[in-house]
Image (spheres, rainbow, N blue to C red):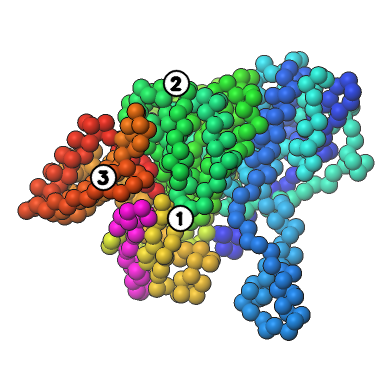
Amino acid sequence: MSTATARHPVALNYAAASDVVVTPDASRVQLALEGSRGTVGVSGRVKDPTLFRDALAAAFGVLSSDLRYRGRDRTAYLAYLMKQGKRASAQIWEAQKAFLDSALEGDEKKDAVLDPVLTVDPDQVSLEVFSRDESAYARLAFDNSLFDNREAAHGSTFLDVPADLPARLDRLRAYAPVTLEAHVAPSAKAAPPASGEPRAPRNVDVPHAWLRGFLQVQSAATLPATTCSIAPIDLYNLLFALRTRRAKKAPRALRFELVPGAAPRLVLEPWEQVLECHGGPYQGHAPAVVRTFGRNRLTALARLLPHAKSVHVQLLGPGLPVFWVIDLGVATLTLGLTGWTESGWSSAAAFDALMPRDVPEPLAEKLRQRLRADGPLTFDVLAKDAGAPKDQVRAALQLECLRGRVLFDVARGAYRPRELMPTPVDEAALRYGNEREARAHRLLGDGGPGAGEVKLTQVHDLVGEGTRIQGEVVDREAVRSFFPSFTLDLEGRVKDAGCGCPHFRRSGMREGPCEHMLALRLAYARRRTEEEALRQTPEGRKLIRAETRSYVRRDPATGLEQVYRVSLDGKVVVLAWGPRLGDSRHQRLWFDSDTEARTAYFNRLEKLTADGYIDAASTLV
């Protein structure tokens, strides 16, 4: 079986269905929990029913969201053409194939995702959901102070969410007492199932691709991040701007402009609409400009605006998830958004950076047992008592997150024990998204015998368009070389791709990129990471022969942004500067040697920094 179709079987056994019972005098929220994990549950009277209702509605909204593009259904029109005697075309055959696939796999697709995960800890009860399009993760945590007469049995299990449960939650009213009952077995006061019979066990085959994305977001949460704070009114302004305007052309990014000591700015592309924030000054040590994509997914937070106390944003870097932490007082919602709504094959490079390497197994088990005994604990506490270097401790915790046995609480900056599955997830099965990705890593030398060789032959920076990447891949198993190429646009999407391998010549990009394109994409991402580390040292700067950097500065009086672009290409330094939405001026400088050009190039960058320009390299994908 191919890696793309591999699935993780999960047996779900619910004694009853989740329901909301509303009477004129009181309301009761009955959440049915999966029964194979033993005694797990929580009950109590909710002090703030409105917050409780809106927070659950927002979490379930993330669970049901699916923003993937769907083409227009032309089945009826194509059937009409066939009745008129039109000959079969490629569109007709594709429509027939899609219909058969939908008819034969409909039952399987319904159970393609996991139910939400409910975890009861000594200090809180939390609910984790992951969207159907694998682009949004949410963790909703209720503090103990939200409940009166709280009774709890600690542990983790799955939660039953019928299709009509969110609509039933909307019936809760603040003037009537609301009670939460989340148990494995229904209580004596609980209403019987609508069918009048116990629910039959259900088997779910979760695709490894979905499970991989779910754990990938949690693993990314453990990485160091750039953090800024904005006020709830800033989030309202952002959502209002997104609701009233629609971008018809790229780029469609949400850009963060962070200057130490100044309030963060949010910039909406392509209109360059600037939103000044009011959540306090940015506390970082260095200025930064970070672009994020998939901003329409933030509409899931709209219902929480009346309850929000503060909003914190954690930016990990290009292609990696972004975490929005909404402080609701006695509750917290953490929304993790992947780099793009439809990550596609670009996510392979991001996930490659999340895989820990050379982790001692005893250290990972030791940390997990410590969390089970004393959790939640911060990284500093765990590293102090682990007796191992901090990089190994971080890698071990990251590995446990990928196995589903440890959770990083972004809101509190602490690790928590949480068993996603009754048995740990095999991270080796989730290492690669599909067989082509596994072969791409083999070509890079990560997959054992049969390794190939991947060379980046040309990397062209296309002003206003993206980056053109060309390379050579030596495939020793095929006993030949291939020359893949593609362009990464300003939103990280691929266009103008090409390769001479049989896979691409047969189907192009319709079935996804070939292993040679994936290998080239991974090689490019790794080289970018190495170059960013090397260029911080004098020795590393001597190795740079060609590079392009962008610097930006916004005039506080006029609000206009100036962009300064500096390129080094051998003995030539190219300069371009001007307003972002306007004509630029250009200058080309020739030097007698590479060393002189390199010296002039870095002197120019240092002068721009001294003049208040911000290095916008993090905006590149």
Which residue is the site of mark 1?
493
**Gap between marks 1 and 2 measured at Cα:** 34 Å
The image position of residue 114, as x and y in percent, is 67, 45
Which residue is the site of mark 3?
577
Q: Determine if residue 442 is in view.
A: no
Residue 280: which disc? Answer: 2
The image position of residue 303, as x and y in percent, is 66, 31
Residue shown at the point (63%, 44%) measured from the top left? 131
The image position of residue 464, as x and y in percent, is 36, 53
Callout 3 amino acid: Trp
Q: Is residue 109 left or right of residue 364?
A: right
User: At numbered mark 3, what does the secondary structure look like: helix, strand or loop?
Assistant: strand
Q: Confirm or deny contact between disc 1 and disc 2 (CB under 8 A).
A: no
User: At numbered mark 2, what does the secondary structure look like: helix, strand or loop?
Assistant: loop
In the rendered structure, which segment of residues is drawn in magenta? 460-483
10 Å neighbourhood of mark 1: few (<14), some, or many (≥20)?
A: some
10 Å neighbourhood of mark 2: few (<14), some, or many (≥20)?
A: some
Of residues 188 and 518, the one nearer the viewer is 518
Residue shown at the point (43%, 52%) measured from the top left? 492
Q: Give whichever of discs 1 and 2 has the lower sequence position.
A: 2
Q: Is residue 188 left or right of residue 184?
A: right
Callout 1 amino acid: Arg
Q: Is residue 461 above or below residue 262?
A: below
Counting labels gives 3
